[in-house]
Amino acid sequence: MTISPVIRLHPDDGVLIARASLPPGTLVADGVTTVERIPSGHKVAIKPIAVGEPVRRYGQIIGFATVPIAPGQHVHTQNCGMGDFSKDYAYCADVKPTPNFDLPATFEGIRRPDGLKKNPFTGDNPLADFPNVDGVVALTHKTGCGMTQNEPLALLRRTLGGYARHVNFSHVIVLGLGCEVNQIGGLMEEQKLAGRLRAMDIQEVGGTRKTVEAGIAFVREALADSNKVKRESVPVSELTVALQCGGSDGYSGVSANPALGAASDLIVRHGGTVILSETPETYGAEHLLTRRAVSREVGEKLVDLMRWWDAYTEREGAEMNANPSPGNKAGGLTTILEKSLGAMAKAGTTNLVDVLRYAEPITKKGFIFMDTPGYDPVAATGQVAGGANLVCFTTGRGSVFGCKPAPSIKLATNTPMYKRMEEDMDVNCGTILEGEESVEQCGQRIFELILKTASGQPTKSESFDFGGAEFAPWVLGATM
């Protein structure tokens, strides 16, 4: 079977996506041939687009022509830019029942004494006498002092509290200097932390050496207890999966993101939870999510977030379209509108049941949106603090992101990058572009890998013991 050199995503689109680099003279539509080289993953016009006229991809506006665009021309930053247009939020218009499976899937997890579940993962384990312990993780950050005592402090404490309670940890020790703004006592009280947590102030313990010795003693004390756990069958309803993308390209919204969306639908239909985040990378597509909100209140929370980001970027002398990054643009993404429309595909098609602030605890099942920046480590840190015990991360340019304590599954959008970085990529979604499988078939593969990972099979990043340095709480407000 001959595969078309271009991909059409919607009948109303005025552009098509190059499946591979296209030389001049390539036939891409009836009566339309390329008049210049179209890089792989980039857009080619198939009809005249006048100055100021919308450019459509996915059937949605991704920008406006800044100069006349002729059929066969390359459509990118040189001739397409941002512009204002009205959005119909149509709150709840597309809400529909989510059919659940009669026999929910399970994974082999660890049930905590308090009823919570752990999504166990294995890697290189130097703790030979403790085979059920994956390792000891040191998560450090550079804030907690020199900060204002309002929302910045509350956000930091939500993040630290979420990690301290996280079910992927058996025990936690919190270390502080002793005189910082974020006093450990205040953190413990505000976040209601107890049980598996031990806290120490360096000043009170008596200095660095004594604190290190006390910390090591606590770990030794905890190891035997941590090692007692055993896996058992746990329903997918106890699984919370963070949806991330980084190093996106023109194929992200065609292959890996829709495939992850299909897997997300399976998770939700089995009773589980998925978290879409990166608010700046949802900007311009929020009107499609408000239609799926289970209530007007939930939809308005999302719109309010977009207004906050508009004001925030204006205050900082920036603009929302500063995203996509240079790498995104090199991969074929022209505007934040185009990037957002592709990014939201990760969340599948189910109803939006809640909208949360950064690092807020997740209390509902289904599709959740959490406010985070677009920067991957900061975004994922908020999702994990909220309760995500596994991360699915799509990438087109190639990202090696790891995320302790949550395993990170890497999904490649295209085969050349997958082959080039196979040691880091867990799934090749380029098979969709090559016609080897459908979006749904690839989504089923991703879902099955999620269950295997939740049952202890290590991801590529875990095999490198990668991710301890990716703990990055969102820093808000002034540093004093």
Image (cartoon, rainbow, N blue to C red):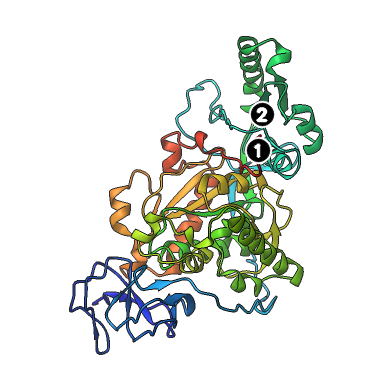
From the viewer's perspective, tell me whether residue 209 is left or right of residue 329: right
- Secondary element at image label 2: strand
Circle 2 residue: 172
Residue 308 at x, y percent in the picture: 66, 59
Contact between marks 1 and 2 (CB within 8 A): the answer is yes
Asked which quadrant contains residue 147, the reply is top right
At x 38%, y 59%, the residue is 413
- Secondary element at image label 1: helix
Question: Residue 235 or 120: which is nearer the viewer?
Answer: 120
Asked which quadrant contains residue 112, the reply is top right
Dividing the image into 4 quarters, which one contains the C terminus? top right
Mark 1 vs mark 2, CA separation in Å: 9 Å
Residue 90 at x, y percent in the picture: 67, 79
From the viewer's perspective, tell me whether residue 401 is left or right of residue 386: left
At x 62%, y 22%, the residue is 223
Q: Is there any visible trace of residue 412 in the rendered image?
A: no
> Badge 1 local density, few (<14 within 10 Å), some, or many (20+)?
many
Q: Is residue 452 above or below residue 125?
A: below
Q: Earlier in the sequence, mark 1 or mark 2?
A: 1
Circle 1 residue: 163
Q: Is there any visible trace of residue 73 in the rendered image?
A: yes
Q: Give amino acid for label 1.
A: Tyr
Q: Give amino acid for label 2.
A: Val
At x 64%, y 37%, the residue is 479
From the viewer's perspective, tell me whether residue 457 is left or right of residue 28: right
The single residue placed furthest to the bottom in the displayed view is 31
Dividing the image into 4 quarters, which one contains the N terminus? bottom left
Asked which quadrant contains residue 66, the reply is bottom left
Question: Residue 190 or 405: which is nearer the viewer?
Answer: 190
Q: Which mark identifies residue 63?
A: none
